[in-house]
Amino acid sequence: MRRNIMSRVLGLREQRVQFFYDTDFITSGETSATDTSNLAVSQKNLFSDARAGNLLRTNLQGPGQLLSDQTFLTFAVRHEIMFYAAGTGNTVDVTKGGLNSAAQLSIWTMSSSIFQYQVDTKIEFEGPVSMTAAGGGPWGFVSDSASPLITNGEPSTPSIYVLPLPVAVSKRQAIAMIEKKFAFGGVDIPAAINDYDGGKLFRAYIDGYNTRDVQ
């Protein structure tokens, strides 16, 4: 007997509050050039090449767009950034700009990284990642600690920058979060990130209302 468990209920749509995310890098230790999924580069287009199956990295089900006839209203763009010492991992190669702690690398990365949220062929929203804090996850700073933890945003709702007007993603429109990292003030940010031998994470979110078929 064949069972059709994925049939749609015609004329009925479901709206849910659900964010989508993709990951620039999530790893620990120095990143080699062969580890392209975690290599920090001057520009990486998140969501465009997202592959379903690993929820640690992304919850997008298809590369570059929502599946089927789904639509999305983006009310917030968010970034989660974390560098944390693991064992001896509180150092950064001094030849990449003189950085020597997770705190310094965190601040420089947030201050000199730019995002562009693209829908179809248009840039709909852009700016420094420091303006789009995650508003969730671990947060804190211990002033007398040799291994301080800094994340991009205090874990509370007020830390999330909400767009005054939503950015709409229509059916089958392409989406991308273009992440750009710069060399600034003598500090080569992508090189410093790759040389850092502690834990490191860079993740982008689009947050809002997802409308999909009812099955």
Image: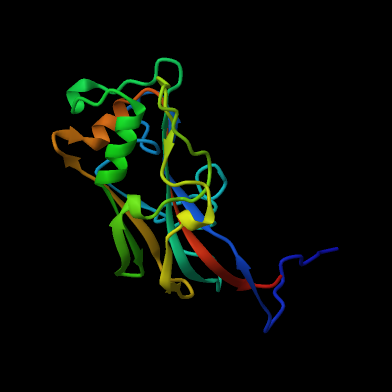
**Residue at screen point 52% across, 66% down:** 208
**Residue at screen point 24% across, 32% down:** 191
> In the rendered image, which quarter contains the C terminus?
bottom right
**Residue 151 picture location, percent across and down:** 43, 40
Furthest-front residue in this view: 144
Note whether residue 79 is visible. yes
**Residue 107 picture location, percent across and down:** 31, 38
Viewer-closest of 209 and 22: 209
**Residue 111 picture location, percent across and down:** 27, 45
Left or right: 109 as drawn, with respect to 78 = left
Furthest-left residue in this view: 186
**Residue at screen point 42% across, 51% down:** 133
Furthest-top residue in this view: 88
Which image quadrant for residue 15? bottom right
Viewer-closest of 215 and 94: 94
Instruction: Answer above or below: position of 128 versus 10.
Output: above
**Residue at screen point 54% across, 59% down:** 19
Viewer-closest of 96 and 136: 136
Instruction: Answer above or below: position of 126 versus 90.
Output: below
Left or right: 38 as drawn, with respect to 209 = left
Instruction: Answer above or below: position of 3 versus 48.
Output: below
Note whether residue 33 is visible. no
Furthest-bottom residue in this view: 11
Type of colouring:
rainbow
> In the rendered image, which quarter contains the N terminus?
bottom right
